[in-house]
Amino acid sequence: MCYGHNQSFSSRNSLRRRSHDDSVVDDLRDRLAETEARLRRARAREAELSRRLEHMKRFVSVMEIIETFLERRYQEQKDRIVRLFSPVSTT
């Protein structure tokens, strides 16, 4: 009788342990799924930020080209005005 009692107690413990193990595994799977989802979102955000950074780099390059062009034009106009208003040499 004691043997049968111990066997049913043992099988109940085994079932509880298995049930607990299953819930731990389910919890870990849920946490893994959440982590993977966060990782996907982080990668998507990184890709978006990289795309925006490249766009801004191109914009800065264009602005630098325009700045160089305008500085050169300004200097040319300045030189032209200086020549226009400088006294004519009569040599």
Image (cartoon, rainbow, N blue to C red):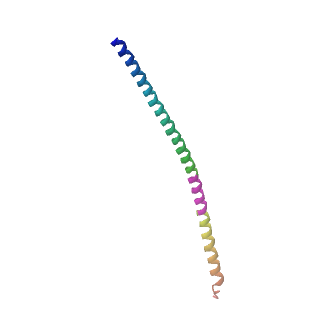
Which sits in the foreground, 48 or 76? 48
Q: Identify the residue at horizontal 62%, vertical 64% (top origin).
A: 66
**Quarter of the N terminus within the rendering:** top left
The number of numbered badges drawn on the structure is: 0
| Image-based side of 72 in relation to 4, left or right | right
Q: Identify the residue at horizontal 38%, vertical 19% (top origin).
A: 9
| Image-based side of 23 in relation to 5, left or right | right
Residue with the most extreme front position: 1
Q: Identify the residue at horizontal 64%, vertical 75% (top origin).
A: 77
Which sits in the foreground, 41 or 62? 41
The answer to whether residue 90 is above or below residue 19 is below
- Position in image of residue 38 (x %, y %): 52, 42
- Position in image of residue 12 (x %, y %): 41, 20
Residue with the most extreme left position: 2
**Extent of the magenta region:** 52-63
Which sits in the foreground, 57 or 1? 1
The answer to whether residue 33 is above or below residue 63 is above
Q: Is residue 18 magenta?
A: no
Q: Is residue 59 magenta?
A: yes
| Image-based side of 1 in relation to 50, left or right | left
- Position in image of residue 36 (x %, y %): 51, 38
